[in-house]
Amino acid sequence: MSTPRDDMRQNEAVSENRLTHCQYRFLAELPFCQSEMEAARKARVGKSTVSRWKQNPVFADALERTREANLAASRERLVDGLAKAIEAILGLLDSHDANVRLKAALAVLDRAGLGPEVGVGFSISPQLAELLERAKEE
């Protein structure tokens, strides 16, 4: 007579060339979790089960593809956020408030590598120097 654990192992052996429902569930949880342990808990499988699955080349490949897809999605979100941040700073260059415009301009120059520590080979007017000093004090 077989136990539920024996049945589970037999199902895994039969599924060596394809993923099981539990493995799919684990992989589906992974992008929304901080760790594999959390994904295992949400998929209702044990940590040792996931460790055993990792020995299966089919699962290991699916896990790697899932991680790569998650990384690509994260990079895409960062690029989108970067574009929004740049637009926000550039939009501030048109502010009616001179202080806001100055700080936005300094942020743009600094992010472009033209901050005050870089000798860019041009001189600034005394008025701009005074504004820069006031901006630093605030």
Image: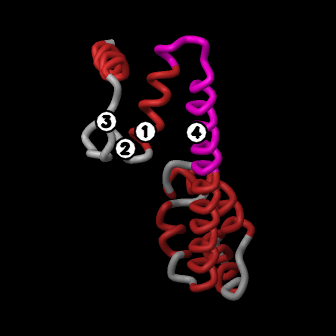
Which mark is on residue 86? 4
Q: How is the image coloured?
A: secondary structure
- Where residue 112 sits: x, y (%)? 44, 46
Can the viewer see residue 17?
Answer: yes
Q: CA distance from mark 3 to mark 4?
A: 26 Å
The residue under the point 70% across, 60% down is 25
What residue is drawn where x is 42% and y is 31%?
106
* Residue type indicated by callout 3: Ser
Q: Is residue 119 left or right of residue 88?
A: left
Mark 3 or mark 4: which comes first in sequence? Answer: 4
Q: Nearer the viewer, residue 116 or 38?
A: 116
Q: Are marks 1 and 2 in contact (CB under 8 Å)?
A: yes
Residue at 55% x, 11% y: name it.
97
Q: Residue 109 bears which disc, if any?
A: 1
Going from the N terminus, do you reach mark 1 or mark 4 first? 4
Q: In the rendered structure, which amino acid carries the disc numbered 1?
A: Leu
What segment carries the magenta color?
A: 77-100
Q: CA distance from mark 4 to mark 2?
A: 16 Å
How far apart are the two marked residues, 3 and 2, measured between alpha carbons?
Answer: 13 Å
Mark earlier in primary sequence (1, 2): 1
Could you tell me which residue is drawn at 33 percent across and 12 percent down? 138
Which of labels 1 and 3 is toward the front?
3
How crowded pointer 1 is (Cα within 10 Å; few <14, some 14-19, many 20+) is rated as few
* Image-quadrant location for residue 57: bottom right
